[in-house]
Amino acid sequence: MARLNFTPFPTLTTERLTLRQLTDEDDKEIFFLRSDKTVNQYITRPIPSGMDEARDFIQKINDGIAQNNSIYWAICLHDKPILVGTICLWNFSDDKSIAELGYELIPASQGQGIMNEALKRIIIYAFETLKIEKLEAFTHKDNISSSQLLVKNNFKREPGRIDEGDIDNIVYFLNRFTTAFSFLGLFLFHSWL
C-alpha cells in the first residue's frame, strides 16, 4: 500500500498561480466560498453560520493534511496572496491509487483560465509525485462549466457509474497511463512551470 506524506506542505506554482496551504487569514474567503449561492449552486453541503465555522473548517482541513488523509490548496495569483479558490485531492482509496478531485472558484475569478491552470498542475502532482493511478471528479449534471473543465483536461465520463451520494452528479475519471493526456504532454507542460 502506498503512503502519503504532505509534510512539508507541497506549495505548487504555475505561470500565474501559487497553490499554498490554507491559513487562518483565509477565513473571510473560505466563509464566502462556502456560503455564496453562486459557488454552492450545485453543491450539497452545510452553509457556515459565521466566521467561527469558517475557521473550524480551515482547522479541519489542516488537520487532515497533517494526518496525510487529504491535500487542499488555496489558489492565489502570484501578485495577490488572497485566496480566489481552492483545489483538493481527497477521499483516497485504501491503497492510495485513486483520489477524488474537488475545486471551487470565487465568481469574480471565473472565466479567466485560473482553474484550468490549477487543475493541470494538480494532475501533474497527483500522477508524478503521488503516483495516483486514477483521478475521479463528481460534478452536477447541470454544472456545464465544471464538466467542460474536466473534458478539456481529458477526463472521461465513467460509463454506468452513479454517485450514490447524489444521483444528479456525473462521475468523470482520468487514468494515469491510459489517458489521452499523455506523459509526454504532462512533461512538456511541466517543463515550463
Image: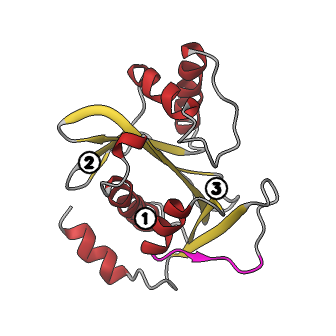
Which x, y percent locates residue 81?
Answer: 26, 32
Instruction: Characterize the local packing of mark 1: few (<14), some (14-19) or many (20 or more) Cα atoms within 10 angstroms.
Output: many
- Circle 2 packing at 10 Å, graded few (<14), some (14-19), many (20+), is many
In the depicted view, which residue is nearer to us: 131 or 125? 125
Q: Amino acid at mark 1?
A: Ile
Q: Which residue is mark 2?
A: 17
Which residues are drawn in magenta?
154-160
Disc 3 crowd, CA 10 A, few/some/many (<14, 14-19, 20+): some
Along the polypeptide, which appears first: circle 3 or circle 2?
A: 2
Residue 125 place in picture, x, y as percent: 40, 60
The secondary structure type at the circle numbered 2 is strand
| Residue 43 x, y percent position in the rendering | 65, 46
**Comes first in the chain, label 2 or label 1:** 2
Which mark is in front, 2 or 1? 2
Rounded to the nearest angstrom, the CA distance separating label 2 from label 1 is: 15 Å
Above-or-below relation of 118 to 45: below
Q: CA distance from mark 1 to mark 3?
A: 15 Å
Q: Residue 123 got which mark?
A: 1
Q: Secondary structure at mark 1?
A: helix
Residue type marked 2: Leu
Q: Nearer the viewer, residue 108 or 121?
A: 108
- Magenta span includes 157: yes
Residue 103 lies, with reference to residue 137, above or below; the image says above
Question: As shown in the figure, which amino acid type bears the numbered disc 3?
Answer: Phe
In the rendered image, the residue lying farthest to the right is 164
Label 1–label 3 contact, CB within 8 A: no
Q: Which numbered tag is attached to residue 92?
A: 3
The residue at 54%/15% (across/down) is 51
